[in-house]
Amino acid sequence: MRDEGGPAPWPSDDASGGFTIDLAVPYADSGRDHVLRERWRRQAGELVPPPPLTLPRRSEGAYRVRIRLRNLGDLRLEDQYSDAVAGSTGGLHGHHEDRIMAHLTVRGEWRFTSAGRTSAAGAGLLCVRRNDEPWDFTVARGTRAVALGLPARDIRFPARRNVVTAEHRAPAVRLLFAHLRAWADVADGLGPAASGAARDAAVELFHGVLSDRVVDDPPFSPALVRAATEYVERRLTDPDLDPGAIAAALHVSVRTLHRAFAQEATSVMGHVRERRLDRARAELLSTSLTVSELAARWHFTDSSHFIRTFRTRYGATPNAVRRA
């Protein structure tokens, strides 16, 4: 069961020692589900509460589960091995519902179902999901995965979605898990400042995974552009309106925002300038504000910059338009 070079922060699921949970329950035991939960509680306590599990009935053999837990600040890493089992997160109220959960399957398959939608995470896939609603899950026999839990309050999860998948070979995924492996290797020797920096870096790398994956979905970019233009319209007089502020308000990265606008006729700030010019032109024709006052009101560098930009857009200077 060795997976050399895999994405886990530990060598393999059969490396000796260090297991938080290491159980084998005979399939033929009539009380196998109860026995599993009781042994699980005795070994892990509240560190890894047992979900409601249902073991298949077989005449021979035993169900095997191994979990090695590592807490990195308020992030949780679990290196998991499981034989075939089914269960639900509904019995974990108060433990995981405030977290974003990510399963990177090394071997086998996890399958998650919520609100009638099923997401499969086979070998080589990362499955990221919200955990505020219960999920039913099934695990194939001999499945090994790395589970990562992050505090939901710090994660900008894509709106109107409850699951995101990505290939483990994707550069952003590889970078995230390389960082987690390195952090786990040196965590015991880090001081508070370095630990906090490692934690913040992991969260930002996780956002990179979400952004890289979601922006490739065809319906996402147009929706993001619409949301950005609506936000811009409400904030045109804000002197701090820039791609960083827009991206933060929409819970995406600046890179994702720029990539969404790549298919448009203008850039993010190009759109901001155009809308400010439109508003300046309207006030040029309806108010007595001077050109200098309009330039300052709509956040152009100076009146010369405003006049040049205005003439490029409308084919005439502001004063010429006003006289006409």
Image (cartoon, rainbow, N blue to C red):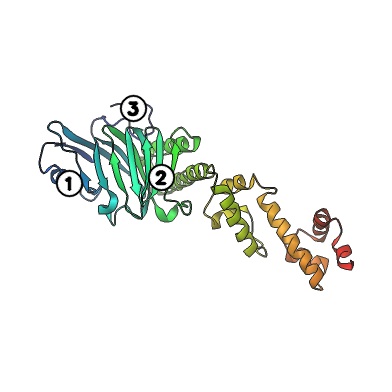
Badge 1 crowding class, 10 Å Cα cut-off, few under 14, some 14 to 19, many 20 or more, is some
Q: Nearer the viewer, residue 179 or 241?
A: 241
Q: Earlier in the sequence, mark 1 or mark 2?
A: 1
Whether residue 64 sits left or right of residue 310 in the image: it is: left
Q: Earlier in the sequence, mark 1 or mark 3?
A: 3
Q: Which residue is mark 3?
A: 3
Labels 1 & 2 near each other (Cβ < 8 A)? no
Name, please, the residue furthest toward the front: 116
Whether residue 314 sits left or right of residue 238 in the image: it is: right
Q: Which residue is mark 2?
A: 128
Q: Residue 23 appears at what percent x and percent y?
A: 18, 38
Whether residue 235 can be seen here:
no
Q: Secondary structure at mark 3?
A: loop
Classify residue 165 by image quadrant: top left
What's the residue at 60%, 55% (across, down)? 226
The Cα atoms of the two marked residues, 3 and 2, are separated by 22 Å
Hey, what amino acid is under mark 2? Val
Which label sits on residue 37? 1
What's the residue at 73%, 64% (across, down)? 279
Labels 1 & 3 near each other (Cβ < 8 A)? no
Quarter of the image where the N terminus is located: top left
